[in-house]
């Protein structure tokens, strides 16, 4: 069963913060999105659009979406494919990794990183339990 997932990011996002999400993509997946949110917007939406064979990143602020950045092409996942998405925050950007491979560098459009305090995951994905989103800090660089 797919489900939305929401987790508080204690202390907000900061340079050196690493967010690792692991789960299983359902066989009929159309879309999966990972959102780093603040109270009035979305600092980063990383969206896997299997129905369009594309991956995009974007931000939502002051009631409007920004310009989409295409992060690559994607084909339909294998049946019950296990995935890992890692988001690493630096002073300048979010570095996004898929299954250990760096797929995109997304420059910060929202600068108050400490206010980014919610991780949302939605779409055709299964998370086994809430321990599947791990957050920890590395020394910032």
Image (cartoon, grey):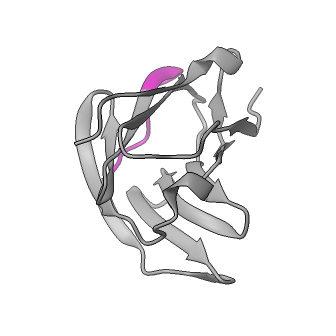
Q: Main secondary structure of the magenta part?
A: loop
- Left or right for 65, reference 104: right
- Which quadrant of the figure contains the N terminus? top right
Indicate the quadrant where residue 28 lies: top right
Indicate the quadrant where residue 8 lies: top right
Q: Position of residue 106 (x, y in %)?
A: 33, 60
For the record, the magenta segment spans: 73-83
Residue in the foreground of this view, choosing between 69 and 12: 12
- Left or right for 78, reference 114: left
- Tell me what residue is drawn at x 35 percent, y 38 percent: 16
Q: Is residue 80 magenta?
A: yes
- Which quadrant of the figure contains the C terminus? top left
- Tell me what residue is drawn at x 59 percent, y 73 percent: 60
Residue 72 higher or lower than 103, as above or below: below
Residue 117 higher or lower than 24, as above or below: below
Q: Position of residue 116 (x, y in %)?
A: 59, 54
Indicate the quadrant where residue 2 lies: top right
């Amino acid at each position: 069963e797919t489900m939305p997932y929401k987790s508080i990011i204690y202390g907000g996002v900061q340079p050196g913060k690493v967010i690792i999400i692991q789960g299983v993509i359902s066989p009929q997946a159309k879309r999966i999105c990972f959102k780093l949110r603040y109270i009035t917007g979305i600092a980063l939406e990383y969206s896997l659009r299997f129905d369009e064979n594309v991956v995009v990143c974007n931000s939502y602020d002051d009631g409007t979406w920004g310009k989409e950045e295409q992060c690559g092409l994607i084909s339909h996942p294998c049946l019950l494919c296990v995935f890992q998405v890692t988001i690493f925050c630096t002073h300048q950007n979010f570095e996004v990794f898929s299954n250990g491979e760096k797929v995109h560098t997304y420059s910060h459009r929202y600068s108050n990183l400490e206010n980014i305090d919610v991780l949302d995951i939605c779409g055709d994905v299964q998370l086994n339990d809430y321990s599947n989103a791990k957050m920890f800090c590395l020394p910032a660089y």
